[in-house]
Image (cartoon, helix red, strand yellow):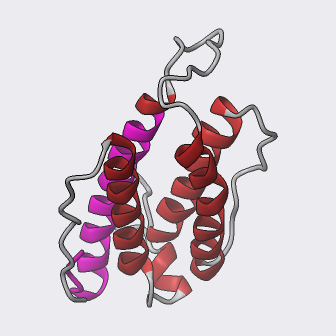
């Protein structure tokens, strides 16, 4: 897998954060693509993490934070199934999430809950960026263990 560098930008805050999130998303998808279902479901670490689990988790995390917790939309239950379905669900959610991330005020707060303090959309976007990058790193290691593939 050829290594791809992150974009270098001099854009504003929102454009920069969205570009970096998209870069991490695309890097993650490149990392989990081309793996058969058995390999994608294979658990190589004690935590039980697999490529297919990571993909479903990221799809759910974006919907949970942006669509449900910030925008108040109903949330579908987390998905389950083969890696191709997980990738498709993850990519399909980007348009809905990005519409909100592109247009809503970054300073707008989501309501506090019984468990959580309020956070603004800027924090949510930064959290998704770090969450996606973190799990892309996990996918890097798992993919290398599976078949030796490296690169972003």
As rendered, which of 117 and 55 lies closer to the eye? Answer: 117
Q: Quadrant of residue 68?
A: top right
Which residue is drawn at the image coordinates 65% and 31% (left, top)? 69
In the depicted structure, whether residue 3 falls above or below residue 79: below
Q: Quadrant of the N terminus?
A: bottom left
Tell me which secondary structure the magenta stretch mostly adopts.
helix
Q: Assess whether residue 15 is covered by the magenta stretch.
A: no
Q: Tally the marks.
A: 0
x and y percentages locating residue 13 in the rendered image? 32, 41
Magenta region:
124-152
Res. 45 in view: no
Looking at the image, is 30 positioned above or below residue 9?
A: below
Asked whether, in this view, residue 47 is left or right of residue 91, the answer is left
Indicate whether residue 136 is drawn in magenta.
yes
Query: Residue at image x 44%, y 56%?
Result: 48
- 141 on left or right of 57: left
Residue 84 in picture, x, y percent from top left: 60, 82
Q: Residue at x 31, y 82 (%)?
A: 146
Residue extending farthest front: 11
Q: Nearer the viewer, residue 90 or 84?
A: 90
Q: Nearer the viewer, residue 12 or 85?
A: 12
> Is residue 120 visible to us here?
yes
x then y, percent, for residue 72? 75, 31
Residue 92 in which image quadrant = bottom right
Q: Quadrant of the C terminus?
A: bottom left
Q: Position of residue 47 (x, y in %)?
A: 39, 51
Is 118 above or below relative to 92?
Answer: above
Residue 44 lies in quadrant: bottom left
Q: Going 56% across and 20% down the picture, which residue do you hit?
A: 109
């Amino acid at each position: 897998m050829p290594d791809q560098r992150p974009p270098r930008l001099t854009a504003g805050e929102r454009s920069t954060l969205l570009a970096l999130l998209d870069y991490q998303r695309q890097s993650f998808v490149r990392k989990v693509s081309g793996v058969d279902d058995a390999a994608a479901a294979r658990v190589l670490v004690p935590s039980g993490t697999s490529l297919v689990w990571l993909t479903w988790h990221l799809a759910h995390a974006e919907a949970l934070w942006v669509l449900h917790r910030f925008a108040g939309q109903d949330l579908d239950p987390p998905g389950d199934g083969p890696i191709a379905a997980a990738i498709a669900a993850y990519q399909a959610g980007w348009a809905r999430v990005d519409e909100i991330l592109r247009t809503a005020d970054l300073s707008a707060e989501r309501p506090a809950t019984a468990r959580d303090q309020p956070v603004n959309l800027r924090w949510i976007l930064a959290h998704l960026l770090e969450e996606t990058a973190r799990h892309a790193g996990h996918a890097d290691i798992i993919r290398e263990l599976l078949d030796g593939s490296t690169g972003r």
